[in-house]
Image (cartoon, rainbow, N blue to C red):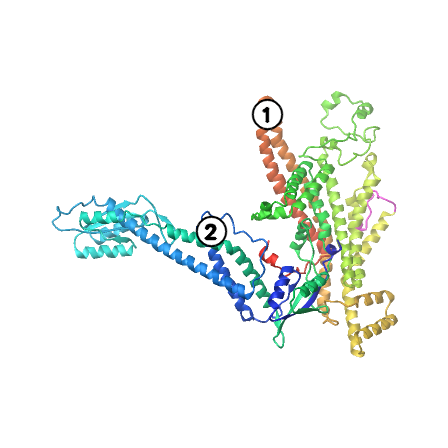
Amino acid sequence: MGAFFRSEEVCLVQLFLQSGSAYNCVSELGELGLVEFRDLNPNVNSFQRKFVNEVRRCEEMEKTFTYLEQEIVRSLFPPQAGPLPTPSPLPAAPQPRELMAIEEESERLARELREVRRGEREVLRKEGEFRQADYPNKVLPGIFPSRVFFRLLPSFVAGVVHPWKVPSFERLLWRACRGYIIVDFREMEERLELPETGEMVQWTVFLISFWGEQIGQKVKKICDCFHTHTFDYPEGTTEREKILHGLQGRIVLSQTEHYLQQLLCRSMAVLPQWKVRVQKCKAVQAVLNLCSPSVTDKCLIAEAWCPVRKLLLLQSRKNGSGVDSFYNRLPDPSTPPPTLFHTNSFTAGFQSIVDAYGVARYREVNPAVYTIITFPFLFAVMFGDVGHGLLMTMAALWMVLQERDLNLRTNDNEIWQMMFGGRYLILLMGLFSIYTGAVYNECFSKGLSPFPSGWHLQPMFEHYNWTDETLRENQYLTLDPNVTGVFQGPYPFGIDPIWRLANNHLTFLNSYKMKMSVIIGVVHMTFGVCLSFFNYIHLNQLSSVFLVLIPELLFMQCLFGYLVFMVLLKWVAFCPQDSNRAPSILIHFIDMFLFTENEDNPPLYHGQMIVQRVLVVVALASVPVLLLGKPLYLYYNHRRRANTRGVRGGGREGGRTRERDRDWKWITTFLLVMLIWDSGFNPFAPPLQEFDTADVFMHQAIHTIEYCLGCISNTASYLRLWALSLAHAQLSEVLWVMVMRISLSWQGYVGSVVLAVIFSFFATLTVSILLVMEGLSAFLHALRLHWVEFQNKFYSGTGYKLNPFSFSSILNPV
């Protein structure tokens, strides 16, 4: 849990790789997945780096692999189901000689496939032409069987044309030839494939007869303009019959197809291995481009981030790999290290929620530790219903139990991947919803009665002489808790189910949920402010504890913490018997800021007005401390360090000791402690930074205004817990009254059929509206409460993740 509360310690190491073994060394680091390499050539264009030719070479091979895979998907028989399988175990990165062999073999396969494809297209084209030429000889000879009846011998042009070109083709022929032609069109019975596109086209056959050479030239030009396929049409019947018999034999493509299948099977057998190996080689070459050559150009120098606890593993693997290289741990860098949190299948979903807002700074407190509990709880406050929570829990529990199913884990649907990745989050949301639903005593909008009610009606009959006639004549009757036996104590757990029969049921629930929302919100925000203490201590900023944290706590607790105190005190101090004498907290809170007293609103406790005035004064006094304390302290600290460096020289430790001796003489003990603490070595800043007074004051002024106004707006923002809980309960009740109650009014066999039909409709609406839509709404509101109201009290989210160089993450990015 310690590594999850703060990010893991990361250090910067310098690797010295011999030029001949650099490839093998980086390949070994890719298998381990330990380090993230830094770019030591930021000013060098990516096309001018040392290993850019090797990267391009791998990219060209990947293009060849893509072509081979497309051909496999297109023409392999039987067809391949899904993508190509991933080889197991994964092969290692290839050596240069092996990479050359892969390149030659893949290019040879691609070249042969292209030749086969080219030959197949040519054969298909010839076959199409023969079929198109065959069809006119079959269907058109009957038009002009002989020309003995013509005084002038006609000429013929036969061919095929696209069907959608026929009207314009015929119109142009008629107008250009002035009607001195005879044209006949017939549709072919079978579709033929276009070799260029693979499209199946049903051609239209035409036969044009004309007289005269000039008209013949016009006809041929028009046919060329419309890109028709024309064929020689023999003049005699004998010649036509010879061609017809010669075209009856079908061209056989079995040998070509058989050879194509052999090439595709060979490609499929080796392609998965080639793809993995070339991807690894490309990744290694990309990392080598990040390295800087040494002065002698005999080795490569690399810098990488590495977890501190992995240094021994890094050294042992490098020593055992037989690679002549070594590393050196660099001192604390000026750049903040990356953030690394180790998560598992349970914590990954909660960490993703936090990282979606922003990645934590290095060694910053991680909100995901507390989000595991607070996020499902705040969701459940808005979604509380035993029935709906049980349905959500069952769905999430099924995903948890089936998490090892490979089909579920590799599903490409984005919505499913999101839900499956957050299965433990959904499980906790369902469990917490069952708990809060039990507190609200709601199950599909109906109340449960596991225990007897604390309110009883019989004493009212005895004390006020109620009769059955009294019940019939009065629409509303009030139970008096001061009558002995009417109220016998609170309900053992949750809300008493008798409240559902009361006319003021909604008023009571609204008051309860509204106050509960404010209490939860103030506690949640106060906890967030307290967490900033750990960040200040870790960064050696003791001054921020006294000048930022304490004023923030005083401002919030003196105002809104006191509001929560009054709510709890009123609940404890007043019982149902004297509830009519309970004062209004709202009036007290308003009078607190106005410094006035209201005689009609009695105080909650003795000396309340004095306490309230003191709290308001303390809250107002904390604002200038929060506004000016930290900037003035930083300004004084900067001037003190600048004067000390200008007057005295010496080493860093000696200068720091003399500064402390001088502080004992001139400043108070309290300020000295803060100065000594804050003067500790900061790994992210140089010893003396440029100090901009206006910028510091402006930054602190923005923070103060944002915090003070945010305390008010954020507290009001937590009222969404009450609003969404009310909306969910009302929607659930409307769905029950308008849908399910209808089926319960029917009886007999007809009632059973009606119940089955309406229940299916009710179940569909419950899942689609109350579970999906309302659940998504509550999820988004809980997300906002964590991102804005909770995390902005202590969490900056300005860091960046550690992305170690790992082959597994490159090959499986999801």
Q: Nearer the viewer, residue 666 or 237?
A: 237
Q: List the single residue furthest toward the left.
A: 151
Q: Earlier in the sequence, mark 2 or mark 1?
A: 2
Q: Nearer the viewer, residue 790 or 259?
A: 259
Does 524 sit above or below residue 543? above
The quadrant in which residue 646 appears is bottom right
Q: Position of residue 506 (x, y in %)?
A: 71, 36
The reply to whether dot 2 and dot 1 touch (C-beta < 8 Å) is no
Majority secondary structure in the magenta region = loop
Magenta residues (range): 592-606
Q: Nearer the viewer, residue 225 or 532?
A: 225
Q: Which numbered dot is residue 752?
A: 1
Q: Position of residue 787 (x, y in %)?
A: 68, 53
Residue type at mark 1?
Ser
Residue at the spot 46% in from the left edge and 47% down from the top edge: 78
Q: Which residue is mark 2?
A: 73
